[in-house]
Structures are given as C-alpha cells and as structure tokens.
Image: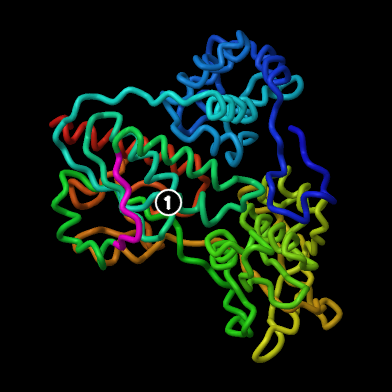
C-alpha cells in the first residue's frame, strides 16, 4: 500500500493509506492461484467468494468484482480498510507458505473505491414479505443484519441512539484509518435497499420496550460500549479518559477538524495511553495529531503487542514512544493529572496463547514516573448494558453479554442478538459475521422454518 510520509500525515487526519492504483491491483490479482479448495474463503468471517472477485479483477472486470463482493458484504470499503486480513483471509492464503499472501484486503478496498467513483449498483431485493424487523444499533452488526434482512424483502427499521449512524465505525475509528464519508456512503447503500434509519432514538427511553417487542423479529446489535478501567488510585482526576470517550469526542465533536472546530480534548501537551490493542494505537495516533507528546504504556514486550503490526509501525513512525514491560500503578495529581507512576514488569512463563505472563518487579528501583497531563485507558470494553437490562426475560451471561444460541436467538424466541453484545468485544468483521448468521436465523423463523 502507498503510505503518506509520517512527517506529513501526523499533522492532519487525512487517510494514511492511499490504496492500490488500478494497474497494481490487476497485477496483484494475477498472483492468485485460484485454488480448488480456497482456504481464504474459510478464513473470512462473512464468507466472501474471494477467488471469484479476484479473478474478475485479474480480467479487469471491475463491475463484476463489485457485484460478487456485495453478494456477501455490503461494507467492502470499510472491511478493506480495517479488517485484520493478515489473521483471516490473507493468513489462510496458500501463497503465504512460500512468500507473501495475495493482498486480499487491498483488492477489496480497490474494488469498493472503484465502484464508488464509477457508479454504484444496488443489489436486488426480494418481494415484500410483509414482515417487520427492528434492528437496534447501527454499528457493523446492525448495518450488516439490516442489509441481509432488507435483501430478503422484510421491512427493516434501524434504531440508533446517536445523531449519526455507524457505531464504532463512526465514533471509534479515527478518520485517518477510516474516512467518515466512506462510512456514510456504505450505510447509504444499505438504506437504498429499503431499510429505514431512526436516529436519536434510544430504545427503552424514546422507544418503549413493549413497542419494540411488537415487531415480528428484533435484532440487538448495540456493541461493546462499556469501557473498562484499571481500578488504580487517581482514576477520578481531571484528565483521565477511557479510549471510548476520547475517540468519541474527537470523532463526533469534530476535534479532528481543527482549526474549524475548537473542541477541547487534549489537556496539556503530554499524554499517556495505557494498552496495546488497536484501540490503544488509534488513541495514541490521534493524540499525536492533536499536538501531544505521547507515551504508550504496555505491560508486555513490544513484540507481544496485540494490535495489528502495521498499526504499531505506523504509530512508531509518527512519533509515539513505546514504554513496554511497564504497567501503571497510580495516577498522580489533584485535581488535575500531573503524572503516572509505573512499575517495570518481568516476563515469566508463557500463558496458553504463547505470550509471557507479566509480573511486577520488586524494589523501589522498579518504579518510575512519567510526567503527563492526561491519561487514556484503552484496556478493553464490555457489552453495552443500556438496553439488555431493560428487557424482561432476556438471559445475560456473567460478563454482561446477551446469551444466544448458534443462530443468534436469545431466550426470547423472536429476539436475536449479534456482534459484541453477544460475543464480547471483537473485530468489525467478526461482528458482521455474527450478524449474518443471526439474519439467516431470522429469515428462517419468519418463513416458518426451524
């Protein structure tokens, strides 16, 4: 992929990756061996016919490639940008056994971008079934389920509590990784299939639960909106944020559109981000673009970071300082943040995943302090509890997830759940795969099938 120079991109929120040129995309597609048993399809959570769409690109039949993609995925431009293909379709590519895998994600993005620039075709929609389905949440799970259900001919209404659709796609992923106009464009394609979007509608508040349950089927896709905290001293100080709040402020309050908007987000000039996943990298890179010196504190080694390798390298190139084998024990200050005290960690035996188990080193010399004005905690999030607790008889798991069967059905027969609210926090594409499965179950139920 073509990356903009780090010295340029760190000063704005324009997309870092400029994508594949047409000639390069065709040459990349020609690398595909068209395996008789394509493992890449098995590695895709939404089961895209990867060999077919890549073959169409190789023949420069870009319109056909777009049609093939959208048979299984109505959000190809989004998935092409944010899916961890290296662990899924590309990770299963047979070419990776002797060299580099086919760049499936880059080709998916290329086709989606090509279609957006050359005219979009909407997929066909089945005749109306007369059935009404409510989808709660317009994130990747909700939008995917809505597209599948609308395609089947049902009348679909999407309820979204915020004033913009997209969920984590809109408020959780920064624009330099996923431009907001692309999110809006692909959601609009789903709405063009007949789904109706109701913004500023909070189920259980502005939409009563009994009204929701009168629909023929309900799909809950409210995501993982409950941030986790470390539970250390000083977390109540001014200047301590969850990554959810920080990224939402930037994405929905236009802090990234400076100087047009003056949204106060960064406090002072030195920021500590705690965590090592993709959300931590996003938070750190956003803070850099807002002018801060950024430390990323992670309790294991740099090679153990769970974030995508490309995102880690991008963060380093953009000036994020990695403080690995360290863990915060106290946030200093009062009432404002004045620093964070950390302890160095020893890497001991390996856990079940093969990563070392970190344990604090003993002795005063193992402690050190970083002089910061702000702390962002990006250590994970749990299922959004706002709706599931309001529906009587809805069985919930010990971690707050909604309990579902293999088809996404909850303890209420006509209510289904998909995405992070059912599986716990995961990736965008896993939420989409979960939603497709639940949508198939809803289609079977509404057709009177088991």
Q: Quadrant of the N terminus?
A: top right
Using the rendered image of the protein, determine whether residue 403 is visible from the camera's viewpoint: no
Camera-nearest residue between 408 and 253: 253
Name the spot of residue 5 as percent of width and height, x first.
83, 44
Helix, strand or loop: magenta stretch: loop
Residue 301 covered by magenta stretch: no
**Quadrant assignment, res 308:** top right
Name the spot of residue 25 as percent of width and height, x first.
68, 20
Name the spot of residue 31 as percent of width and height, x first.
69, 14
Q: Quadrant of the C terminus?
A: top left
Using the rendered image of the protein, determine whether residue 58 is visible from the camera's viewpoint: yes
Find disc 1 in the rendering and name its residue: 165
Name the spot of residue 214 as percent of width and height, x first.
13, 52
The answer to whether 212 appears left or right of 246 in the picture is left
Camera-nearest residue between 267 and 284: 267
The answer to whether 389 appears left or right of 421 in the picture is left
Camera-nearest residue between 72 and 57: 57
Q: Residues within 10 Å of mark 1 (few under 14, many from 20)?
A: many
**Quadrant assignment, res 330:** bottom right
Magenta residues (range):
195-202
Residue found 79% across the figure and 59% down from its top: 320
């Amino acid at each position: 992929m073509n990356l903009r120079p780090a010295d340029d991109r760190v000063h704005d929120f324009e997309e870092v990756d400029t994508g594949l040129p047409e000639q390069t995309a065709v040459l990349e597609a020609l690398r595909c061996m068209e395996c008789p048993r394509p493992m890449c399809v098995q590695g895709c959570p939404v089961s895209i016919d990867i060999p077919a769409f890549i073959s169409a690109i190789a023949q420069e039949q870009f319109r056909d490639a777009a049609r093939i993609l959208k048979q299984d995925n109505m959000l190809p431009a989004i998935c092409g940008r944010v899916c961890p293909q290296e662990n899924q379709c590309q990770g299963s590519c047979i070419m990776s056994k002797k060299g580099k895998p086919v760049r499936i994600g880059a080709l998916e993005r290329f086709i989606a971008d090509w279609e957006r620039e050359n005219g979009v075709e909407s997929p066909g929609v089945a005749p109306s079934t007369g059935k009404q389905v409510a989808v709660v949440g317009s994130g990747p799970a909700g939008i995917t389920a809505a597209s599948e259900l609308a395609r089947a001919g049902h009348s679909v209404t999407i309820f979204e509590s915020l004033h913009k659709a997209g969920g984590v796609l809109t408020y959780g992923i920064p624009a330099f990784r996923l431009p907001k106009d692309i999110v809006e464009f692909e959601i609009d394609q789903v709405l063009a299939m007949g789904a109706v979007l109701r913004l500023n509608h909070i189920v259980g508040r502005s939409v009563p639960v009994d009204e929701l349950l009168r629909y023929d089927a309900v799909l809950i896709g409210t995501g993982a909106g409950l941030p986790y905290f470390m539970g250390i001293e000083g977390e109540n100080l001014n200047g301590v944020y969850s990554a959810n709040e920080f990224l939402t402020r930037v994405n929905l309050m236009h802090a990234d559109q400076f100087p047009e908007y003056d949204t106060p987000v960064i406090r002072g000039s030195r920021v500590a981000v705690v965590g090592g996943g993709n959300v931590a990298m996003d938070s750190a890179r956003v803070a850099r673009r807002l002018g801060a010196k950024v430390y990323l504190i992670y309790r294991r080694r740099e090679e153990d970071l769970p974030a995508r390798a490309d995102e880690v390298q991008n963060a380093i190139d953009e000036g994020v300082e990695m403080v690995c084998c360290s863990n915060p024990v106290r946030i200093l200050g009062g009432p404002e943040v004045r620093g964070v005290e950390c302890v160095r960690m020893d890497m001991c035996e390996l856990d079940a995943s093969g990563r070392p188990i970190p344990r604090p080193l003993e002795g005063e010399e193992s402690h050190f302090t970083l002089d910061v004005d702000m702390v962002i905690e990006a250590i994970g999030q749990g299922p959004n509890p706002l709706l599931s607790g309001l529906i009587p008889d809805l069985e919930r798991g010990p971690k707050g997830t909604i309990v579902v069967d293999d088809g996404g059905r909850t303890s209420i027969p006509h209510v289904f759940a998909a995405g992070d609210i059912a599986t716990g926090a995961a990736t965008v594409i896993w939420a989409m795969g979960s939603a497709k499965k639940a949508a198939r179950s809803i289609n079977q139920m509404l057709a009177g099938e088991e």
